[in-house]
Every structure is written in C-alpha cells, then in structure tokens.
Amino acid sequence: MYPETVILEEQGLRDGLQSETTLLPTAKKVELIHRLMEAGLKRIQVGSFVNPKLVPQMADTATVFAAVQQRPDVSLNALVLNTKGVERAIEAGFTHIAASISASDTHSRKNANKSLQEAMNEFENMVRTAKAAGMCVRGGLQCAFGCRYEGKIPVQRVIDLCKRHLDLGIDEIALADSTGMGNPRQMEDLMGEIVAMAGNIPVMLHLHDTEGKGLANLIAAMRVGVRHFDTAFGGLGGCPFIKGATGNIATEDTVYMLEEMGVRTGIDIAAIVNIAREMETILGKKLPGKIKNVLSTEK
C-alpha cells in the first residue's frame, strides 16, 4: 500500500519566499541551496522567472543559479508562467523548468493576467520553446482541487487539462492544491486517475496546508501511486494572488512522518529543522511547521 521511498522537492526558496517582505540576500539563498543538497534533497526549485516588480524576491533567480555549485545527483529547476520566462530560464542555463497554469479562470487572470484559454495557449508555446532548447519540462496545474474565488473546480476540467499537458510531451506532470481546499478522498479519486493516465510519466503533488489537511492529503495520494511531493522548510509559502493562502506542507514535518511510517526520504531531518529555525530568525516570525518546535537536533 505504501512505497518504500518517496522523492521530495524543496520549494522553500521559491514558493516559500515569494510572498515574504523580507528580501533574502542572494548569497544566503545560495548557501541554503548548498545546505539543502547536503541534507539529501535531490530536487530543489531555485526560484522563478516572473515579473520582478510584482515578485521582488525572485528577481535574482538567474544570479542564484549561476552561483550554485551544482551536483550531478541534484536537479535544480525554476518556475515559469509564460514564454518570456522560459526564454529567461534558457538564458540562465537551466535544463529543467516547471511550467504552470491555473485550472481556475479567475485565479489565472489574477496570477498570470490571462484567461484559462489564453493560459493554455501560452502553455503550448512554453512547452514548444523549452523542448526546442532540450529542456526537461514539468507541466503543472494550480488550483486543481479548489479555488477561493470559484469554489470547486470541475474534475473533468482538470482531467482534460492534464491530458492536453501530456499530449504536448511534457516529462512530468504536477497538480497543486494551491488553496489547501483538497481533502483525502478527493486526492485518492483524482490522483489515482491522473497516475493511471500518466503511465510512465512521473506524477507530482504540490500541497498547501491552509486547512490543516496537507499531510492527510499526502498519505491519500501516496496510497494511489503518487511518489513525488513538493514541500517547503518551515512550512513557508503562499500565493500573493490567493486570498487566505498559507504555506506548503513543511519539509521537516513530512520527512518525520514518512520516516516514522517506514517510508524513506534520504533527507537529514535535523539539517532541515535547523534551516527552518534560522528562517524564523531571519524573517522575524514563527513558521507553521510543527516538528521543529519539539525535535532536538543536538548530536
């Protein structure tokens, strides 16, 4: 029922920081990426190529990537929301991007200034541009399990959009519970169908813990074959264009739970706890992750 191992992608440096008002210095971001690598993370989202005026935290993504001492066993990627973002990622030297659109028309207009249909057309251009450059493309759907503006998202719409993504030749597919509205039964039903549809294409799940169901949703998805999950140290995160949005499931909480279940992650939980605690000091606030409050990291 449960796998022996799962793969976690650390998104604290992108999703985790994008809404924060405290700007993290470039050198600090690079240091954190190196520490995450040492802690055993094999996939890290470095940042995003979006409008720096709207999301100033991501303005230095190319500079951060250039300064990282890369390792062959670690995949670094960046989020892009339009073709210009893909071109910027190519210029920066990325070989792996996450190209994402929203399953909600209202959220799409707020987040990308495009209707759902316009976003899908743009997505096709993004994939073509990335593939022409030899990039690995993770195709994503935001708000796949609910929207604060529109409410429930029709399941058939999500399935149809995923099929269109797959037909374009993406290398990985990811669904995001951007609003944290999803529930375990919904995860089992929809993710089971997506896993079957995707075949040999890796299926990923991006979970927010807005309503406190994040880890329960992870377990439900794991039961139907999902083996890749996004997390963020400390439970950082949230979209500036989703009302009431809170953070991702915390990397350290996820690792702790999975390891207790006998599901290996290969991640040093003490190292992640130390990063989460340090970020609380840097940002000047308590982060929502739980295990860092009770786990001793003393050797």
Image (spheres, rainbow, N blue to C red):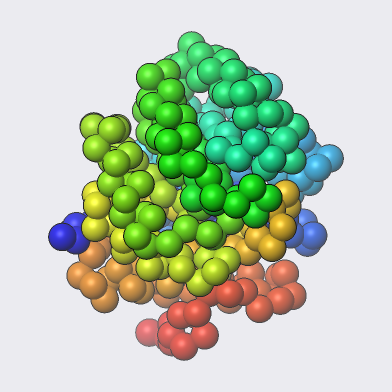
Asked if one can make out residue 2 in the rendered structure from this viewpoint, the answer is yes
Q: Residue at x 63, y 69 (%)?
A: 279
**Residue 236 placement, left or right of 71:** right
User: Picture coordinates of residue 205 (x, y %)?
Assistant: 41, 49
**Residue 204 placement, left or right of 133:** left
Q: Residue at x 68, y 29 (%)?
A: 115
Quarter of the image for residue 106 reads top right
Q: Residue at x 23, y 65 (%)?
A: 263
**Residue 5 placement, left or right of 188:** left
Q: Is residue 297 above or below residue 7?
A: below
How many numbered callouts?
A: 0
**Residue that lies at the very extreme toward the top in this rendered image:** 132
Asked if one can make out residue 67 in the rendered structure from this viewpoint, the answer is no
For the C terminus, the quadrant is bottom left
Q: Residue at x 79, y 60 (%)?
A: 21
For the N terminus, the quadrant is bottom left
Quarter of the image for residue 51 reads top right
User: Picture coordinates of residue 92 (x, y %)?
Assistant: 61, 27
User: Picture coordinates of residue 37 (x, y %)?
Assistant: 43, 54
User: Picture coordinates of residue 157 (x, y %)?
Assistant: 47, 34
Q: Is residue 19 above or below residue 114?
A: below
Front-most of 136 and 215?
215
Front-most of 249 and 193?
193
